Image: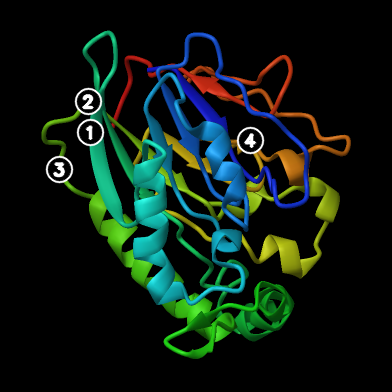
């Protein structure tokens, strides 16, 4: 299956017109597309099916719990399939069954270990104040984000460990990055942006996320982040086993499923 990936477009402040990638069979929107949601209208009548995974900024100045059903309805109106702690099996043109497991994932702030969790949460608190979101009438602070992350993480871990049944390969889609090694190197060791990454169980063929892109020895992490990646960012060539290809132009990746799968 050839995938087109877009994330972190931040159309609430950026000017960008998405265009379909030639040959893509599915568009994956991995979050932070437009905090106002107005830019989602650009994807109406997209020529191929669309999967949408919410980013943190889709909830800016909103009540988290109440926003989920409203956002889901909006996506349905535009022909998108919103996935949150859900899996979906799609069949590509070659007849291969691809299981997509997806969740925003949020951040548990344990990337640097429990001893550094408090410092990571303090760094993350700044961004939660910028979001100005609430959950059940209370500020959606770093502690609340961690609670959401643990719930998402438990679901994702259990889902990825399920015995193969009815699918040939698995693609995991999250907004928050699955590894410290996928953090943008331009940030160095600054804890605030790096604290946005959260480890994910490596039980899938291809992890897709927002924020950044990189490769590890065991798997490929694919991302396409326009707003974060634009200034001087160059994509890392992806692991040939997953056959992910960086685009010649524009914030879009295509991936074709290979014979090896999980």
Tell me how far mark 3 sits from mark 1, CA to CA: 14 Å
Number of numbered markers: 4
Residue occupied by mark 3: 163
Spatial CA span between label 1 and label 4: 23 Å
Horizontally, residue 161 falls left or right of residue 5, namely: left
**Of the two numbered discs 3 and 1 in the rendering, the one whose residue sits closer to the viewer:** 1
Foreground: disc 2 or disc 4 = 4
Residue identifier under label 2: 168
Of the image marks 1 and 4, the number of the one nearer the N terminus: 1
Q: Which residue is depicted at the point 64% across and 80% down?
A: 121
Horizontal and vertical percent for residue 103? 39, 54
Eyeballing the image, is 252 above or below 204?
above
Q: Is residue 126 visible?
A: yes
Expressed as whole percent of the image width and height from the top left, the position of residue 228 reads: 76, 46
| Residue count near mark 3 (Cα–Cα under 10 Å), binned few <14, some 14–19, many ≥20 | few
Q: Which residue is mark 4?
A: 224
Q: Secondary structure at mark 3?
A: loop
Discs 2/1, front: 1
Q: Residues within 10 Å of mark 1 (few under 14, many from 20)?
A: some
Q: Which mark is residue 221?
A: none
Counting residues from the start of the chain, the first of labels 2 and 4 encountered is: 2
Between the C-alphas of marks 2 and 1, the distance is: 9 Å
């Amino acid at each position: 299956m050839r995938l087109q990936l877009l994330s972190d477009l931040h159309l609430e402040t950026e000017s960008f017109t998405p265009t379909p990638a030639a040959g893509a069979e599915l568009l994956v929107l991995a979050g932070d597309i437009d905090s106002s949601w107005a830019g989602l209208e650009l994807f109406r009548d997209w020529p191929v099916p669309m999967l949408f995974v919410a980013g943190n900024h889709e909830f800016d100045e909103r009540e988290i719990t109440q926003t989920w059903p409203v956002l889901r309805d909006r996506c349905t109106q535009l022909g998108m399939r919103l996935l949150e702690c859900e899996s979906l099996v799609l069949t590509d043109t070659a007849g291969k069954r691809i299981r997509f497991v997806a969740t925003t994932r949020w951040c548990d702030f344990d990337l640097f270990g429990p001893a550094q969790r408090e410092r990571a949460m303090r760094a993350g608190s700044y961004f939660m104040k910028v979001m100005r979101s609430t959950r059940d009438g209370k500020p959606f602070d770093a502690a609340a984000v961690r609670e959401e992350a643990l719930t998402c993480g438990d679901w994702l871990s259990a889902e990825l460990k399920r015995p193969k049944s009815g699918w040939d390969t698995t693609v995991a889609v999250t907004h928050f990055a699955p590894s410290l090694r996928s953090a943008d190197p331009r940030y160095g060791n600054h804890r605030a942006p790096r604290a946005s990454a959260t480890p994910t169980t490596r039980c899938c063929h291809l992890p897709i996320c927002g924020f950044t892109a990189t490769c590890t020895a065991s798997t490929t992490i694919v991302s396409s982040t326009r707003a974060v990646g634009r200034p001087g960012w160059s994509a890392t060539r992806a692991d040939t086993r997953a056959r992910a290809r960086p685009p010649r132009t524009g914030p879009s990746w295509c991936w074709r499923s290979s014979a090896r799968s999980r």
